[in-house]
Image: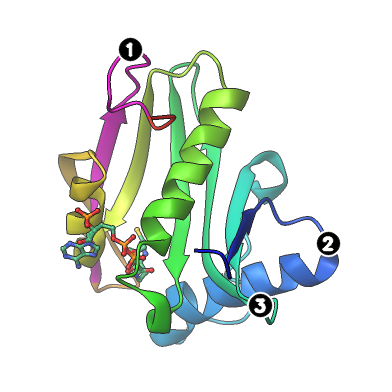
Amino acid sequence: MPQWKILQPNAPDQWENYYQLRFSVLRKPWNQAPGTEHAIDDHAAFHGAIFGEDGKALAVARVSQISEQQAQIRFMAVDPKYQGKGLGKAVLKYVENLGLRNYPTITQFCLQARETAVPFYLSNNYRIQEKTFLLFDEIQHYLMVKDVHPETEDHPDN
Ligand SMILES: CC(C)(COP(=O)(O)OP(=O)(O)OC[C@H]1O[C@@H](n2cnc3c(N)ncnc32)[C@H](O)[C@@H]1OP(=O)(O)O)[C@@H](O)C(=O)NCCC(=O)NCCS
C-alpha cells in the first residue's frame, strides 16, 4: 500500500484528522455530540493511524494497558470508503505491536467489539469471551480477547 502511511499521529493536523475519523465513524451516525470522540485517557494510550495522500485519516486505533497482564484496543475505525481493503487489519496489527513493545508484561489483548465488527476480530485471531453492553441503546458489544504467544505464528510481530 505505497500511497498510505501508517504511523503514530504527532503533528496537530494529524491529530485533528485522527479524531475527525473517530467522530465520523464511531459517534456521528448515532447523533453523538462533537467532543465525545475524545477519551479522558487518550494521552496515556498509544495510537496508530493510516493517512491518505491528502492527509485525511483512513484508519485509526489505540492501545492502552489496563492491568499488568492486559492491554485494551479501543476506537478502531476505518473510513467507510476504504473498508474491506485490509486497512483495519494493518492498523490493528500496528497498535498490537505498539502494545507488545511498550507493555512488556502483557499476556493478552482485549477489546469490546461492536456486533458488526465481531467477524473482523475473529479473522484477526480474537475470540469471544462474553456478550457485554449496549452502546447508545442499540449497539450490542462483545468482550473479545487474544492471548499473546511470542513463540507462535499468532504473534502480531509475525
Ligand atoms: C470493523 C472494521 C474496523 C474492519 O476494518 P476493515 O478495514 O474493513 O477490515 P479489513 O479489510 O482489514 O479486514 C480484515 C479481515 O477481516 C475480515 N472482515 C472484515 N469485516 C468483516 C465482516 N463484516 N464480516 C466478515 N469478515 C470481515 C476480512 O474478510 C479480512 O479477513 P482476511 O484477513 O481473512 O482476508 C471497519 O469495517 C470499521 O471501521 N467498521 C465501522 C466501525 C467499527 O465497527 N469499528 C470497530 C468498533 S469495535
Q: Nearer the viewer, residue 114 or 81?
A: 81
Name the disc covering residue 151, or none.
1
Query: Whole-Å distance between the Cαs marked 3 and 2?
Result: 15 Å
Q: Residues within 10 Å of mark 1 (few under 14, many from 20)?
A: few
Q: Is residue 24 magenta-colored?
A: no
Residue 39 position within the rendered picture, expressed as x and y whole percent measured from the top left? 61, 56
The answer to whether residue 146 is magenta is yes
Q: Determine the CA span between mark 1 and mark 3.
A: 37 Å
Q: Decide which of tag 3 and tag 2 comes sooner along the chain.
A: 2
Task: Mark 2 and ligand 1: say if the CB distance to the nearest ligand atom is below 8 Å.
Answer: no
Q: Do callouts 2 and 1 mark residues in contact (Cβ within 8 Å)? A: no
Quadrant location of the C terminus in the rendered image: top left
Residue 53: mark in rendering: 3
- Disc 1 marks a residue whose amino acid type is Glu
Secondary element at tag 1: loop
- Residue 65 figure quarter: top right
**Which amino acid is tagged 3?**
Glu
For disc 2, the neighbor class at 10 Å (few under 14, some 14 to 19, many from 20) is: few
Give the image quarter of residue 145. top left
Q: Dot 3: few (<14), some (14–19), or many (≥20) neighbours within 10 Å? A: few
Q: Amino acid at mark 2?
A: Ala
The total of numbered circles placed on residues is 3
Disc assigned to residue 11: 2
- Residue 158, can we see it? yes
Front: mark 3 or 2: 3
The residue range painted magenta reads: 139-155
